[in-house]
Amino acid sequence: MNKKKNEAIAYEKIKRAIMLKRLVPGQRVTEDWVSNELEMSRTPIRAAFTKLENEGLIELVPHRGAFVCSPSDKELEDVFNLRIVLESYAAESAIHQMTDEHFKELDELLKEEVKAYEDKDYEEFLRINSHIHAYPAKVAGNKFLLQEVERLNQWADCYLILRDNFYTTPMDQVLSVPEHREVVKALKKRDAAAAKKAIESHMLSTLNDLAERTSIFN
């Protein structure tokens, strides 16, 4: 295998172990473990660690090694409170530019989100979730706003991976699906105030849920 392919395999192996809660926040991830699991040298593994650190899933501690990140409640609050501000602004900016075609695309994303939950496909859910949250910023046509929304979405995805109980939450207890529907409903009515309220309610609901899950054992 070539170097890039080995890096990709190591990255996916570690990330999936974190998503499936086989590696939990605060746990050390050793190069020896990954090397033995994948039967490869340490060089691509180090590159995978660096990529995972950039994504916020791994923390590299000098002279100690790599550890699965354990975000604080303060970090969660900072990210989600900033998302409320930016995504509310995006909705307000885009709401009168949205067409029937835009709403059809949002409705399709909502259907795909339900299917991802039913299939227990976490990676697909995260992809769709990011699209839903970034959609108003894309319609608004503000590339700087879109960059910031997508960047914060990436951080939020990391926190979901580290704390969310995706695989054990029954479909009838999933909050994000009806909360996303409320946001889309307000957008369709072109009610900026209602859209902003729905966005804030959804963000705070997710934040409160994640704040209660300090580890897989809670």
Image: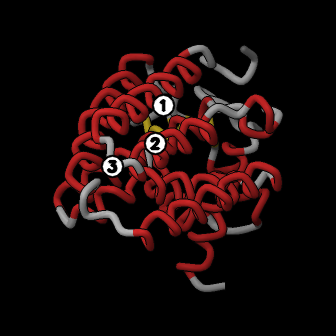
As displayed, is residue 185 above or below residue 207?
Answer: below
**Res 100 → quadrant:** bottom left
Q: Residue at x 48, y 31 (%)?
A: 202
Q: Nearer the viewer, mark 1 or mark 3?
A: 3
Classify residue 19 as left or right of residue 191: right
Q: Which residue is mark 1?
A: 202
Residue tagged 3: 190
User: Is label 1 in contact with label 2 (beta carbons under 8 Å)?
Assistant: yes
| 128 relative to 35 in the view: left or right | left
Residue drawn at point x = 21 percent, y = 66 percent: 141
What amino acid is at disc 2? Val
Select label 3 or label 2 by which is in front: 3
Q: Which residue is mark 2?
A: 183
Q: Quadrant of residue 150?
A: bottom left
Q: Is residue 136 above or below residue 63?
A: below
Gap between marks 1 and 3 measured at Cα? 18 Å
